[in-house]
Image (cartoon, grey):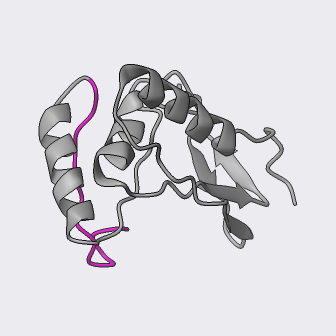
Amino acid sequence: MARRWHHAIIFGSSSRGGSAAFRESVRLLERKQCLVITPDGPRGPREKVKPGAARIAIDTGAQVVPVDFRVSRCWRLNSWDKFIIPKPFARISVTLGKPLPPPGNATDELIEQYRREIEKSLSHDESMAF
């Protein structure tokens, strides 16, 4: 879908290609472009934000904007992330949360604190109905 809308796609994770993806993400943000990250990584655990997203925001000064998707009717895959596929004619609701400004320095303690703040802003109940 992202390619169809002419967006660049950066592949990388904590287990493969992470440093190259990190550098490309920083370059993208330095050019004032938007970046969307699925912060729980390719292997999970589910809804646990990895520190890379926090580190990218701190290094570039970019704010993190939490995004929540809810679907009125869906199929849920039996995978680690419980991937959701909207059913035909389902209503999809997208909510943008309050932007989270990053702290100034990139110490390990601040990265972890900011990572937890991002994770907390993304947590929501499992209810998918409106």
Q: Is residue 44 above or below residue 6?
A: above
Task: Give the residue displayed 72% in from the left and 59% down from the top.
Answer: 71
Q: Number of callouts in the render? A: 0
- Residue 54 is left or right of residue 60, and the answer is right
- Residue 126 is left or right of residue 104, and the answer is right
Q: Is residue 112 above or below residue 126?
A: above
Q: Could you tell me residue 11's position as x and y percent?
A: 22, 46
**Snapshot quadrant of residue 123:** top right
Please report the bounds of the magenta region as a residue range.
1-14
Taking the magenta stretch, the answer to whether it contains residue 29 is no
Q: Could you tell me residue 116's position as x and y percent?
A: 58, 30
In the picture, the quarter occupied by the N terminus is bottom left
Furthest toward the left, the residue is 20
Q: What's the magenta bit mostly, secondary-structure-wise?
A: loop
**Is 71 or 35 nearer to us in this picture?**
35
Furthest toward the bottom, the residue is 5
Q: Could you tell me residue 5's position as x and y percent?
A: 33, 78
Q: Could you tell me residue 35's position as x and y percent?
A: 35, 60
**Could you tell me if residue 17 is visible in this image?**
no
**Is 29 or 18 nearer to us in this picture?**
29
